[in-house]
Every structure is written in C-alpha cells, then in structure tokens.
C-alpha cells in the first residue's frame, strides 16, 4: 500500500491538515520542473519538549522514497510547537532546494545530526530508499524461492 496521501497528521500535530496540504502544494509547485514524477508529502507531531517533521519526496509507486526527518527541542529554545515545525519545514525545504539544484548529489546523514539554523539547533536525518524493490525482495524471501546459480543463467 502506498504511503502517498495516507499519512494523516498525528493528533499531536501542531499543523492543521489544511496547513500541511498547503505547504505540500507550495513545495510541489516550487520544484515542479525538477520532480520527475515525484511529489512532496509532509507529516508532523510534537510532545511536550520537541517537535518532529517528516518531509518526503517520493514517486507514487515508491520506487523512490526519500524522507527527511527533522526534530527540534522547541521548549528549551523558547519556540511554540508550531513555530518549531515551521522552522524545520523551512530548513528541510532549503535542503531539498540544494539537493535538486545539485543534481541530487547532496545528502543529509543517515543518523541524526545537528544543524544550526537561524540561531536554533535542530537535528536531521534521511536516506533514499526504493520501497517498491524492498517489498518485492521481502516477498521473494517470504516465499522461499531459490534463485538459479549464475552459471545456469548463461546456458
């Protein structure tokens, strides 16, 4: 099942569904010429101390799935959860701007890494995945099929 448009905001989201959808629409228009059939989705949630945002660039079939996750300790930095979420989205948007401008050769670390932005400290992580191929591989493994040996493929 595709995650496309199936990830509603968490009940703890500082952003309304309308705000999230408008931000997605803006990013999809802004980068339309570079998306190559992909689109952006945004989810967010928060707890008493931190805000979390995930901006995902993906193909509908999930053969390209690139979530950038961000977190910021909003309480200790005197931000509201909504301000913190919008700050994260702004920073992630600037990352995707560079990623798409540089022919997709700029990456954030796979593990949480700290960044400074507009005087605030935040953390990001991300990894490009091919969920479609991973699903097919999981299915093959679950069925226990044995692949032919390389020398029998040449016959």
Image (cartoon, helix red, strand yellow):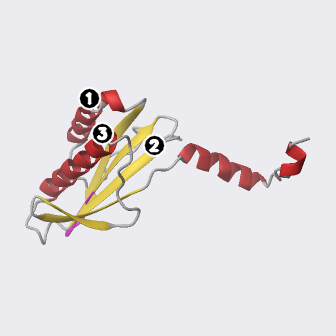
Residue occupying the point 43% across, 29% down: 37
Quick check: 90 left or right of 138?
left
Real-space CA distance between mark 1 and mark 2, rounded to the nearest whole angstrom: 20 Å
**Picture coordinates of residue 32, whole percent (x, y):** 31, 28
Q: Which residues are magenta?
A: 47-52
Quadrant of res 51 = bottom left
Mark-to-mark CA distance, 1 and 3: 15 Å
Residue 29 lies in the magenta-colored region: no
| Contact flag, marks 1 and 3 (Cβ < 8 Å) | no
Q: Main secondary structure of the magenta part?
A: loop
Location of mark 2 (residue): 3
Q: Which residue is mark 1?
A: 29
- Marker count (numbered): 3
What x and y, as percent, mark residue 83? 12, 54
Separation of marks 3 and 2 at Cα, in angstroms = 26 Å
Q: Look at discs 1 and 3 and give the one toward the viewer.
A: 3
Residue 18 in the figure: left or right of residue 2: left
**SS class, disc 3:** helix
Q: Earlier in the sequence, mark 1 or mark 3?
A: 1
Read off the residue under disc 3. 101
| Residue beneath the point at 22% across and 33% down | 26
* Precedes in sequence: disc 1 or disc 2: 2
């Amino acid at each position: 099942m595709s995650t496309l448009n199936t990830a509603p905001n968490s009940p703890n989201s500082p952003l309304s569904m309308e705000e999230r959808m408008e931000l997605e629409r803006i990013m999809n228009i802004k980068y339309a010429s570079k998306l190559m059939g992909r689109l952006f989705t945004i989810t967010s949630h928060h707890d008493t101390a931190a805000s979390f945002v995930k901006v995902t660039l993906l193909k509908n079939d999930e053969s390209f799935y690139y979530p950038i996750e961000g977190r910021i300790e909003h309480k200790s930095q005197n931000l509201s959860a909504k301000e913190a979420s919008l700050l994260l989205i702004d920073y992630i948007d600037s990352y995707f701007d560079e990623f798409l401008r540089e022919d997709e050769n700029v990456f954030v670390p796979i593990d949480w890494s700290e960044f400074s932005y507009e005087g605030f400290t935040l953390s990001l992580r991300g990894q490009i995945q091919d969920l479609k191929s991973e699903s097919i591989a999981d299915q093959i493994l679950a069925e226990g099929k044995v692949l032919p040996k390389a020398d029998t493929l040449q016959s």
